[in-house]
Image (tube, rainbow, N blue to C red):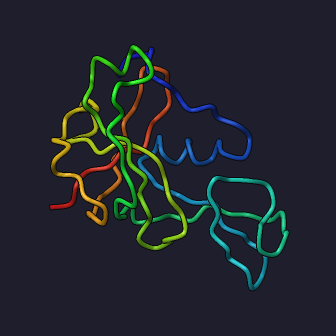
Amino acid sequence: MSDSLLSPVVDEDGAPFWEYAARGELRVQACAAPGCGELRFPPRPCCPRCQSFDSEWRLMSGRGRIWSYVLPHPPLLPAYAEQAPYNAVVVELTEAPRIRLVGNVVSGPEAALNSVDPGRLRIGTAVQAVFCPTDAGTTLVRWLLER
């Protein structure tokens, strides 16, 4: 992946998400207060349900469904123009439907953003997380179409 593509900004609250992604694990922050367990994304210091500051990171299956998608025309950044047409998707996680992650559907971990025919994308299509290391040293979560 090119260094000129956007890279995530890793903050203190979200750092564990990126560390787990680098290990090939999709984890979501959860409240660790007794009786709560609220899942939350994006990561933040306080539970929106019970206001506890106790948290843990729960392993997800990596399965989800396309909740929404777009094909940017034209791409806003020059580095992305080389890969047009590509997709940007919002994925609803299977075990946490209120949690939605943004990414791209690709044909494999090292594949280009335009590696999947846009005609194959549909809202509701099942996808599986795949982990894509970048030149910048982070690992992005992208999505494969389930067969």
**Residue lying farthest to the bottom in this orientation:** 35
Q: Is residue 27 above or below residue 94?
A: above
Q: Is residue 112 left or right of residue 60?
A: left
Q: Position of residue 80 (x, y in %)?
A: 36, 21
Percent x, y for residue 136? 49, 21
Q: Quadrant of the C terminus?
A: bottom left
Q: Give the vertical position of 64 relative to 101 (above or below).
A: below
Q: Residue 131: give x, y in percent of width and height.
A: 37, 43
In the picture as drawn, the residue positioned furthest to the front comes out as 73
**146 sits left or right of 45 in the view:** left
Whether 145 is drawn above or below 39: the answer is above
Q: Which residue is pictured at 79% across the width and 55% down the height?
A: 45
Q: Quadrant of residue 116?
A: top left
Q: Count the numbered circles shown.
A: 0
Q: Residue at x 58, y 48 (%)?
A: 17
Q: Is residue 18 above or below residue 3?
A: below
Q: Quadrant of the N terminus?
A: top left
Say which residue appears at 38% left-offset and 24% top-offset: 75
Task: Identify the residue at image location x=57%, y=65%.
Answer: 58
Provide residue 43's location: percent of width, then percent of height: 67, 53
